[in-house]
Image: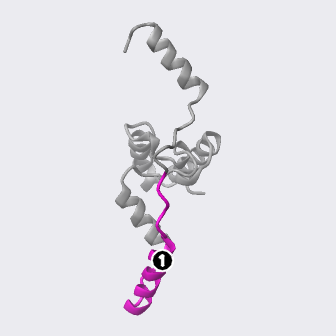
């Protein structure tokens, strides 16, 4: 199992411990396992796991990276001859039909937590 695709904290911790133990079985990988644990798991960039991103949201905040990932997924991460590639890209663009815009009179439904937080802020004159 790939640690990046774990869907819960428990699944991630189980996978992490198993993979680190597997790497440390090889003397050549002990240094890498220590480095990975300190930098990739305990370091500043520890929120790279997929389960930190809500379902339906992009796993990156860069729209170009997200679009690039969609293209790679669509062409199945394979290199194609130019004719087939152009056909696949044409199909991909056709699949991305224009989305209908949100109506201007649309009002987002507020949650009770948001209403409570707003009223507390207003009551305490912190605005």
Instruction: Tell me the residue at 40%/92% (across/down).
Output: 83
Left or right of residue 63: residue 114 = right
Classify residue 116 by image quadrant. Answer: top right
Give the answer, above or below, for where 76 lies relative to 45: below
Query: Quick one: SS at disc 1?
Result: helix
Which quarter of the image is occupied by the N terminus? bottom right
Name, please, the residue furthest toward the top. Answer: 124
Residue bearing mark 1: 94
Which quarter of the image is occupied by the C terminus? top left
Residue 81 x, y percent position in the rendering = 40, 91
The magenta region covers: 74-102
Residue 14 x, y percent position in the rendering = 63, 44
51 and 106: which one is in front? 106
Instruction: Tell me the residue at 56%/54% (across/down).
Output: 5
Left or right of residue 19: residue 86 = left
Name, please, the residue furthest toward the front. Answer: 105
71 and 50: which one is in front? 71
Q: Is residue 96 magenta?
A: yes
Q: Is residue 20 magenta?
A: no
Instruction: Tell me the residue at 59%/50% (across/down).
Output: 6
Residue 76 x, y percent position in the rendering = 50, 76
51 and 89: which one is in front? 89
Q: How many neighbours does mark 1 have within 10 angstroms: few (below 14), some (14-19), or many (20 or more)?
A: few
Residue 34 x, y percent position in the rendering = 42, 43
Give the answer, above or below, for where 81 lies relative to 60: below
Give the answer, above or below, for where 66 lies relative to 20: below
């Amino acid at each position: 199992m790939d640690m990046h695709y774990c869907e819960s904290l428990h699944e991630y911790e189980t996978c992490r411990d198993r993979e680190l133990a597997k790497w440390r079985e090889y003397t050549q990988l002990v240094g890498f396992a220590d480095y990975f644990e300190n930098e990739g798991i305990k370091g500043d960039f520890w929120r790279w796991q997929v389960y930190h991103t809500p379902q339906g949201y992009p796993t990156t905040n860069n729209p170009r990276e997200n679009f690039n990932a969609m293209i790679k997924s669509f062409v199945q991460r394979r290199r194609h001859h130019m004719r087939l590639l152009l056909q696949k890209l044409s199909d991909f663009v056709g699949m991305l039909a224009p989305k209908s815009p949100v109506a201007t009179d649309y009002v987002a439904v507020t949650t009770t937590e948001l209403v409570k937080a707003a009223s507390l802020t207003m009551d305490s004159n912190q605005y």
